[in-house]
Image (cartoon, helix red, strand yellow):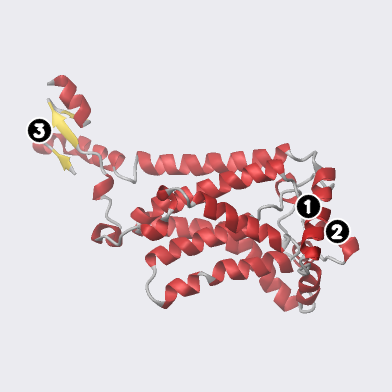
Amino acid sequence: MIEILEGGVRHGGTARVAHWWTSRWGWRLAAEVGVLASLFVLYRWVRYLVRDQVPTAFDNLELIRSIEGAMGLLVEQPVNAWSVRSELFVGVVNRYYVYGHFHLMLLVMAGLYLFRHDVYRPFRNLLVGSTALGMVIHWLFPLAPPRLRPDLGFVDTVAEFGPSVYASGSLTADEANRIAAMPSLHAGWALVVALGLMAVCQGRCRRWALLHPAIMTFVIVATANHWWLDAVGGFAVVAIAALHPAARPWTVRRSGAGERGDDRGDRIPVRSVGGDVRHPELVAQSL
């Protein structure tokens, strides 16, 4: 809350600027955009750094296949083959893979920031923490996706039926996706979105939210973009990130301010002294 002690109407314009800047629509929003943009750039950079690990990525592919085979759950190729039987079905699956990932995440983040800022903060922490852990695993365990093994019967459905999200050319033309299958952040982010929605939904809506990571797990396998163990890895990094109390959106209490999207609790109190609007710490220093 902004309290004008002197100046009244004369300093109203300065007060309004201070009100905006100290609210979550000022420097806080700029900081959020900066943090998320930096995370995205770092994410792409880390995956670019492992571009020369192609042989290791294919060795790890054989390791994943052997593990799933030993479990009797090497199901990726049959699911992929079944999905491409219908061009209509595979078109729906492909679009869920493309638009249900980054686009849906941005939509949910914007909604929480606008209307439930109390939930947004742990939601953002969970997203950042799980993505950071994912980057570490990409570095330590490069893994090629099934779609790069057409000799095993896999069909790259996104490349074949669209909408394409890959660069054309050599194996290293699109370093951001081709050797970074583990963990699947498509699955991990889907779980983060579900947890965020569950924090603000009531009744059956909470259960419906969990369908998103379940569907995304099927989609990443059907499109031959991931092994099902990649989805397990994606869920695991979310679970590890959630060990920190500040990354648990579902524990946020449903306060009245949060329900209304009010940001009064986020504002820094500012006072006008001698005609200048100042932070309270500066006021204390001048007394």
Q: Is residue 209 left or right of residue 1?
A: right
Which residue sits at x=80%, y=78%? Answer: 85
Q: Which callout, 2 or 3, points at the residue further toward the start of the chain?
A: 3
Q: Is residue 111 left or right of residue 155?
A: left
Residue type of the residue flagged with mark 1: Ala
Which residue sits at x=74%, y=54%? Answer: 166
Residue type of the residue flagged with mark 3: Gly
85 in relation to 123, above or below: below
Secondary element type, mark 1:
loop
- Distance, label 1 to label 3, CA atoms, is 66 Å
Which residue sits at x=81%, y=54%? Answer: 63
The residue carrying mark 3 is 7
Front tag of 2 and 3: 2
The residue carrying mark 1 is 144
Residue closest to the eye, 5 or 140: 140
Residue type of the residue flagged with mark 2: Arg
Q: List the single residue furthest toward the top.
A: 286
Which residue sits at x=69%, y=64%? Answer: 220
Labels 1 & 3 near each other (Cβ < 8 A):
no
210 in relation to 270, above or below: below
Q: Which callout, 1 or 3, points at the residue further toward the start of the chain?
A: 3
Q: Which callout, 1 or 2, points at the residue further toward the start of the chain?
A: 1
Q: Which mark is residue 149?
A: 2
